Amino acid sequence: MKLKPIVISLSLLLVSGAALADDDCDDPVAQWQPRENLRKQLEAEGWTVFRIKVDDGCYEVKGRDPNGYRVEAEFSPATFELMEMEREDDDDDHRDRSKRYSEPTNEDRVPRKGIVKGRPSVTVE
């Protein structure tokens, strides 16, 4: 029986699995910078930050990037180096961006043939 190819294959498999699993931040806690510093840095770059939390040793930021896309990004807590960024697709990406952020007109609020276009408005007294 040829044992050498089996041993080599198993060792390569184990090494590659360990390399793929290491996507977490491993900065020592003593070197971490405050989350508020990251928030200030990102807002100065044009981001809108919704939330910053710690996940797998990284700062996970949810917000909008300078281009207006919703993103989830991971930053190193010691250096604020971008580790990973994922763009969250909005449901209305097919619409014009300028129309998405503008106020709806009265025409958009009026139901047509029993079908409401847009969100209904609610008044609480």
Image: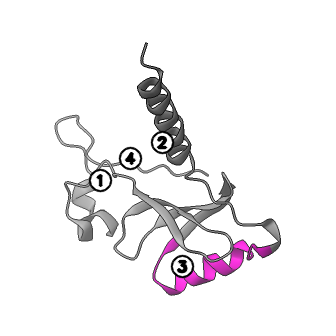
| Residue 23 in the image: above or below residue 42 | above
**Direction from residue 85 to residue 14 in the image, left or right:** right
Q: Which residue is mark 2?
A: 16
Q: CA distance from mark 1 to mark 2?
A: 57 Å
- At label 4, the amino acid type is Pro
**Is residue 22 shown above or below 14?**
below
Looking at the image, which residue sits at the far top?
Answer: 1
Q: Which residue is mark 1?
A: 109
Magenta residues, start to end:
31-48
Horizontal side, residue 123 vs residue 51: left or right: left
Secondary structure type for disc 1 = helix
* Residue ID at (31%, 47%): 91
Residue 120 image label: 4
Q: Which tag is nearer the camera, tag 2 or tag 3?
A: 2
- Place of residue 109 in the rendered image (x, y in percent of width and height, measured from the top left): 29, 53
Q: Quadrant of residue 95?
A: bottom left
Q: Is residue 109 inside the magenta stretch?
A: no
Q: Residues within 10 Å of mark 3 (few under 14, many from 20)?
A: some
Which residue is tagged 3?
Answer: 42
Position above or below: 49 against 53: below
Amino acid type at image mark 3: Leu
Which of pointers 1 and 2 lies earlier in the amino acid sequence? 2
Please tell me which residue is depicted at 23% across the width and 37% down the height of the picture.
115
Residue 99 in view of the camera: yes
